[in-house]
Image (tube, rainbow, N blue to C red):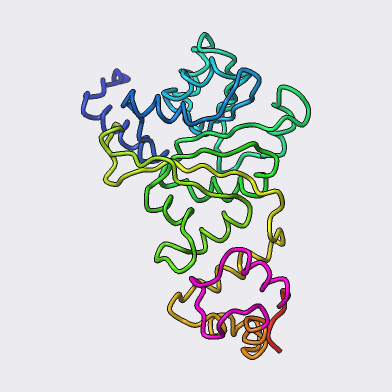
Amino acid sequence: MKRPPQKKHKNETRTDDRKTRWKFGQNFLIDEGVIRDICDDVPSSPTDWIIEIGPGQGALTRRLAPRCRKITAIEIDPKWVEHLQAHTNWGPLEVIPADATRVDWNEILEKHAPEPGMKPLIVGNLPYNRAAPILFQLLPHLDRCLSVQIMLQYEVAKRICAQPHSRDFSFFSVMVQNRANAELLRKVSPEAFRPKPKVWSATVRLTPRNAPACVDPLFSPFVDLAFSQKRKQLANSLESLYPKDKVVKALEGRGIRPDSRAEDISPDEFAALFIELGPMRKV
């Protein structure tokens, strides 16, 4: 005889919810003042197209939808996809059930735009454990956007916006600033979220540059190698790719001290150095 299915204890349900939140990195904004401020920072008008990454419960969505021509929400959690689809009364809302780390941005920008060639404003409260992959997936498409306004962990936000000669200047700083001007907008307390994260968050606005300094796909591993040992001089860090004297000569030719470290080189200088040295291996 089959045993009847047992009811889940309420504590088991809570555990499942915690696992789901951990899996998707979900920390939901609940502070109405912070929500209002973040939405007011988005320079949208009734003619604009907004793409929101990771809307979750729709804290930002419900405020942004009435302010634009169309809002396209990319959400990975089936529960929140269903929730959002039930709230088309908020405004011109379209929901794409997808993982933002794997979406085809070409398809979204071409097939979901209200009209051909329209550039979106991208907004998102990025989950801490997926922020970097989402951003790196988006970077090559920044020139097809009006701006990108995202919230992420404060420490990551500082690295994105950091300038040379600072402790936060990193691989992340160079790769983002190669394609965009980065501005830290707001620092957000853990108290603004449920569940409360253990760290502060911040919003960052990325405004695409007229032309990236370098679009070669090999630029990323070049910069990554340069920062792999931050305390080493750049010429020593790049020895596995180029003869040291060649790097020193290229640095001196650009008026950069030959004993400089990666943290001393601006994104544009990194791009110029890569282009001059070329994607070659030491012989």
| x and y, in percent, of residue 21 in the image | 36, 35
> Per the image, is 256 magenta?
yes
176 is higher (above) or lower (below) than 54: below
181 is higher (above) or lower (below) than 32: below
- Give the left or right position of residue 276, taking residue 39 as reference: right
The quarter holding residue 45 reads: top right
Please report the residue visible at 53 percent of the width from the left and 18 percent of the height from the top: 65
| x and y, in percent, of residue 263 in the image | 48, 70
The quadrant of the image that shows the N terminus is: top left
Q: Work out whether residue 107 or residue 166 is closer to the camera in this orientation and state it.
A: 166
Q: Work out whether residue 59 or residue 234 is closer to the camera in this orientation and state it.
A: 234
The quadrant of the image that shows the C terminus is: bottom right
The region drawn magenta spans: 253-276
Please report the residue visible at 49 percent of the width from the left and 33 percent of the height from the top: 54
Q: Name, please, the residue furthest toward the right.
A: 116
> Per the image, is 65 magenta?
no
Please report the residue visible at 48 percent of the width from the left and 54 percent of the height from the top: 160
| x and y, in percent, of residue 256 in the image | 59, 79
| x and y, in percent, of residue 209 in the image | 66, 49
The quarter holding residue 95 reads: top right
225 is higher (above) or lower (below) than 147: below
